[in-house]
Amino acid sequence: MTLMELIATTEGPRCHRALYVEGKKVSWLTLIDYSQRIGGAVVRMGGIAGVGTEPSERMKGYSRRVIEDTIRFMQNEGYDVSWLFGIRDFYPKFGYAVCMAPTTLTIATRDAERAKDALGCFSVRPYAEGDLDALIELYNSANQSRTGTLVRERGRFSGISKGSRWSIDAHVIVVTGPEDSFVGYAAYDKNETEVIVTEVESLDLHAYPNLLYEFAKLAIERRTGSISILLPPDHPFAEFCHRYECTVTTNYARCGGGMGRIINLRSLFEKIAGELSRRLAVSEHRDADTCLWISTDIGEIALLLRNGEVRIVDECDRANSVQIPQPRLAQLVYGYRSARDMLTEPGVVFSGAALSILETLFPPQNPYVWAADHF
């Protein structure tokens, strides 16, 4: 009989989980404990990273054992959702679905140079360790309602070090106002041939021309004809760049990249109930007194809509109901896909006013995880 043992070791928010066969480490991954936003709500998210198997031990089901055991662990430990940045055609079997569409804004260097005409009274300098608290505060404020973003906290976030890819480090600059006051920051890849900006935020929109012109000067120095900026398409800096002429490309992958799944249905909905209530209160259903029943392959949940508020209840009328696989519900929750888009999905069945209610509770969004936070 083959001896198999799964051993877990914990280092702060990271739990390293590995499968040993006859004493030999054959497959592994790391589970990272994160706080993630869904609208203005914060949920507990298990980030899966560093998945691997010894080449000689592949195609034996070892990785499946580790991943399935990790999902059970998250269910038992009170995680609400899980995310990973995965390869194509492997993770759907574990209930993960694409929940994020990467977007790149491309602007010609010569067009970005035109920002020089609108420069404000700001200065740009390299990032220093003393800027960390201000950077974290600005980041959390700017992303306080952006679905998908991770909550950054001192002690768990030490600064932006990762660039657009794992093999690339980031360089960070700071925009300052009078008396070197912190106004904003930006991060871009450390290389000599491209300008790839991975994050940009500012307290004052008047500093945007200074940032864009800084990128233009960098592009001239690196002798590249364009600048690539990785950011959500509805980010205010993206809107600012429209006036100078740019191209925005969004990649909707069939599989792979940023993928998520629901771990605990009830705890997730309990945590996002306040956000759902805020959406309901400003919708055509704000005066509704009804119920929505959601049935999935990982359980059922009943939502009571009354007095502009959404509450979780144990049982309710099922006239308004939806039968939906968990991966499709995850895509709805993150706003990656719309309820109407689910009409042609196999295994999704709407009854009563369920479609209209779901359109209210889960409007399309631009879920995003900044490159520095990829795991």
Image (spheres, grey):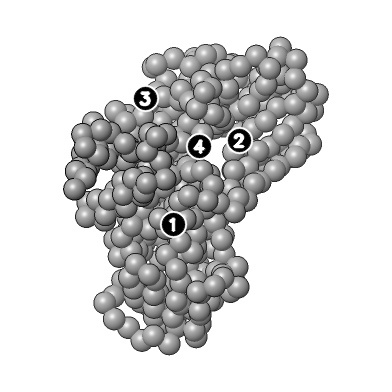
Q: Secondary structure at mark 3?
A: loop
Residue 251 position (above or below residue 25): below
Q: Inspect the image, locate mark 3, and give the three-letter code of the amino acid beneath it.
A: Ser
Going from N to C along the chain, the mark reached first, 2 or 4, is: 2
* Residue 281 visible (yes or no): no
Residue 260 point in image, percent of width and height: 44, 52
> What is the CA distance from the residue labelled 1 to the residue labelled 2?
29 Å
Q: Inspect the image, locate mark 4, and give the three-letter code of the amino acid beneath it.
A: Trp
Going from N to C along the chain, the mark reached first, 1 or 2, is: 1
Q: Which residue is mark 2?
A: 230
User: How many labels were placed on the picture?
Assistant: 4
Q: Which residue is mark 3?
A: 158
Circle 4: is it few (<14), some (14-19), or many (20+) Cα within 10 Å?
some
> What is the CA distance from the residue labelled 3 to the residue labelled 1?
34 Å
Residue 70 point in image, percent of width and height: 29, 48
Label 3 vs label 1, nearer the camera: 1
Residue placed furthest toward the front: 1
- Whether residue 332 sits left or right of residue 239 in the image: it is left
> What is the CA distance from the residue labelled 4 to the residue labelled 1?
26 Å
* Residue 356 visible (yes or no): yes
Q: Which mark is residue 370?
A: 4
> What is the CA distance from the residue labelled 2 to the residue labelled 3?
21 Å
Going from N to C along the chain, the mark reached first, 3 or 1, is: 1
Name the residue: 28% across, 33% down.
25
- Whether residue 194 sits left or right of residue 52 in the image: it is right
Going from N to C along the chain, the mark reached first, 2 or 3, is: 3
Name the residue: 26% across, 77% down.
314
Name the residue: 42% across, 34% down.
55
Residue 296 point in image, percent of width and height: 39, 71
Q: Secondary structure at mark 2?
A: strand
